[in-house]
Image (cartoon, rainbow, N blue to C red):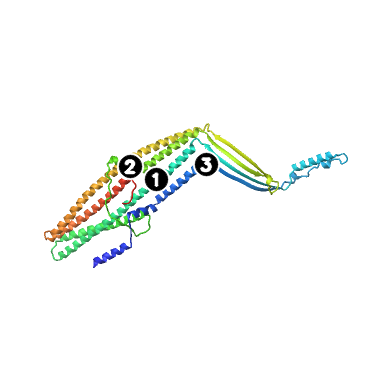
Amino acid sequence: MKKWIVAILGAGCMLTMSAITLDESIRMAKDNNKSLLMAHSEIEKADEQYRDVRGSLLPQLKLQGSYSLSKTYLPDSATGAIPSVTSMLDDAEATETDELIAGALDGIVGGMIPSSPTKEGSLTMQLKMDQVLFLGGKLINSIKAVDRYRSIQRLNYEVKEQDVVLQTTNMFYQTLLARKVVEIQEEALATARKHLARLELFAGEGQVSEFDLLSARLEVAKLEPGLLKAQNDYDLALAAFRQQLGSADDSLIPEGEFTLPQIPELQLAEAQEIARKNRRELELLDIATQVKQLQYNAERNNFLPNVALSASASLYSAADEYRIERDDFGTQYSVGIGFSLPIFTGLSNRSKASYARHDLAIAKLQQQDTTELIGLQVKQNHQKLEHALQNYQVQQKNIAMAERNLELAQLRYDNQMGIQLEVFDAQTTLASIRLQYIAAIYEVISAEREFTKSLGYKLAAE
């Protein structure tokens, strides 16, 4: 009856949990990972930067204008009495011609002296175009560099994505391993307690020595802390797994089995050659070196002239009153080509070119160094995978022997040729080797994932 109650409670607990597969875990981790989200935004920024720089090749059009009204009050000293030439003529002697000349002079003098207040309206519009014709190759090199930068951001996203896939896969199987350890420890402790209960029953009848009874109690006492530690490790692994997924759901638990992955059969030299062709890090460094080369080319071209075309069309007006009439407008058109040629910059351009040359040399050295490090990484992961496979084969033989040992101990006990203690020892040994066997499978899975990633292949769920 007790077993049925435990089974029902366990089933009820499982119903409250949300099992998640490796595929679902990887998909959730990629959707919620902050580093991946930032890397995706960097791609968008690089695309916009490329469009911005590329737009410098096209004509730059600008429309500008202004409309203003002004009213000016002049001081009295500036608007004094206007002398009249006509009034100075002698009416008796002045001829008609004299009067005409005097009137004309009065008009000219009157136009020279401003009136107050003065009202004025003005409207100005200008359409201006600037077109780069030649910048010594700097603009073209800049566009190429920004385009390479876009490629760098996309490759950087792929590298981060594969890191997330590897981390999620490792945490998924680490959590499964921790749960298996708890289950095996629970079975071992249940077996030890069952054995102790049997010995205590026999001890009451005087059929078991005090030493055997004490040994059984010590075995239970030794297994209890192990179970507590296994449960704590499982809780920590589960919390880290949920953190990796970026989920606040406390009911998520990984669901899956330990199955051996397909192992790539590659020699070390072949694996290193594949890595040199496929690794995104090497492609990233190659593009970064190209960017440094473009920057060096641009700095070397600083001694060349810059040539640009400029053209404009203007519409303007000026009126003595606020109201602007149609015939108050005037137009102006201009077009010209300008150039700028550095003669002496205090050796600044030479220093910039030298700096860019050294920067290019550093990029090439970094590329060579990373190539060598990747070759070493592939070698280490190749050896790690071989060791994991060898350990798995050993543990496979060990668990077969432990299972056979338990069968023989149980057979001896059933035929009254052995004692219960032999069966218990065989069960304890099998539990210990089962832990080692499952850990060996996990080691193979982890080593295969890391080796596959070091080859530059895209990781996917099994």
Q: Which residue is drawn at 23% across and 52% down?
A: 437
**Residue type, numbered disc 1:** Asn
Quote the CA–CA distance across marks 1 and 2: 17 Å
- Above or below — where is 155 with respect to 337? below
* Horizontal arrangement in the rendering, residue 433 relative to residue 273 (left or right): left
Q: Which of marks 3 and 2 is nearer the N terminus?
A: 3
Estimate the x, y position of residue 340 in percent, counting from the top left.
54, 34
**Residue type, numbered disc 2:** Ala
Quote the CA–CA distance across marks 3 and 1: 30 Å
**Mark 3 = which residue?**
58
Residue 435 numbered mark, or none: none
* Horizontal arrangement in the rendering, residue 157 relative to residue 417 (left or right): right
Of badges 3 and 1, nearer the viewer stands 3
**Mark 1 = which residue?**
156
Q: How crowded is mark 3: few (under 14 residues within 10 Å), some or many (20 or more)?
A: few
**Residue type, numbered disc 3:** Leu
Estimate the x, y position of residue 222 in percent, counting from the top left.
22, 57
Q: Which residue is drawn at 58% across and 39% down?
A: 311
Q: Which of marks 1 and 2 is nearer the N terminus?
A: 1
Estimate the x, y position of residue 356 in percent, counting from the top left.
44, 36
Quote the CA–CA distance across marks 3 and 2: 42 Å
- In the rendered structure, are the residues bearing label 3 and label 1 in contact, judged by CB atoms less than 8 Å apart? no
Residue lying farthest right? Answer: 92
Residue 275 numbered mark, or none: 2
Of badges 3 and 2, nearer the viewer stands 3
Q: Can residue 348 be seen in this view?
A: no
Image quadrant of residue 370? top left
- Above or below — where is 461 with respect to 106? below
